[in-house]
Amino acid sequence: MLTKEEIEKTIKRQLAYEFNCDPEDFSGEETLITSAVLHEKRRVFSEELPFLQMVTFGNNAVISADERLHPWLRDWVKGKKGFWLFGHQNYFELEKELGNYGYRMASPHHMFFPKPELLNIRTDLKIRWLEQDDIQAYYCREEFPNALCDRFHPERPDVLAVIALDGEQIMGMAGCSADSPEMWQIGIDVCPAYQNMGVGKTLVSLLRDETFRRGAIPYYGTSLSNIRSRRTALSCGFVPAWIETMSETDR
């Protein structure tokens, strides 16, 4: 098993590719502003160069942005702790500035990495594992917007999933996409009739452990206001690690 330090080092190395900085920059005191890049080793959520993206591990922030924004950003961050840039008033100021360029800010996502031990959870639920080829049959189903991508994405494929069954009725599904070779992101969907029964916790825990066994780091993300999802993460051996967000546009 990896240690906590090794997990954190791997994640910061991955984010350094994406934010055009060094891993050590996420532990600094001063907010860092860098030029936006499309690194070949990035997690591929879009083919477009980010206009602005921002991350904090709880102290400073690193902002990767179009260079036209840099003068405004340098003034904006003066006297502000990096993690407070995600607060409402500062976020509103950033959103207003991006509007001048036809962009707005997406919702921040709270990201979790795992404690470095297996949970070895036991369950009486009927469980079925799906390998990458098995997952193809489930892309057409609307019940799993979080467990699976909308379709097969070769740059971050859904590589593993687990479902709980009530007879032949699916109770819920947890799936993970290989966002990078070393980091697999877990998503979970539980059908309404089976919510509040511990199905989500069981599936996420099983998938978390199996991801570790296959040599990757499971990680988990949710919006700041999704309390149910945050509780699931905490109950499945994940701990709060970083917050990231980026700009978006309708164009």
Image (cartoon, helix red, strand yellow):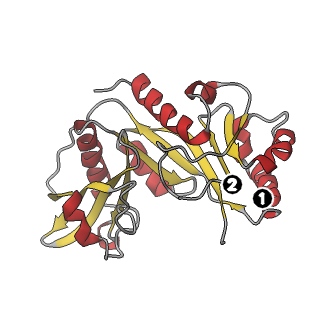
- Tell whether 91 sits left or right of 196: right
State which quarter of the image contains the C terminus.
Answer: bottom right
Q: Residue at x 46, y 42 (%)?
A: 41
Tell me the SS state at disc 1. Answer: helix
At label 2, which amino acid type do we have? Phe
Above or below residue 163? Residue 238 is: above
Judge whether residue 119 can be spotted in this image: no
Give the residue pinned by disc 2.
Answer: 51
Tell me the SS state at disc 2. Answer: loop
2 vs 1, front mark:
2
Report crowding for label 1: few under 14, some 14 to 19, many 20 or more residues within 10 A (C-alpha).
some
Q: Position of residue 241 (x, y in %)?
A: 51, 37
Report crowding for label 2: few under 14, some 14 to 19, many 20 or more residues within 10 A (C-alpha).
many
* Residue closer to the observer: 124 or 58: 58
Dot label at residue 98 = 1
Above or below residue 1? Residue 176 is: below
Q: Are marks 2 and 1 in contact (CB under 8 Å)?
A: yes
Judge whether residue 64 can be spotted in this image: yes
At label 1, which amino acid type do we have? Leu
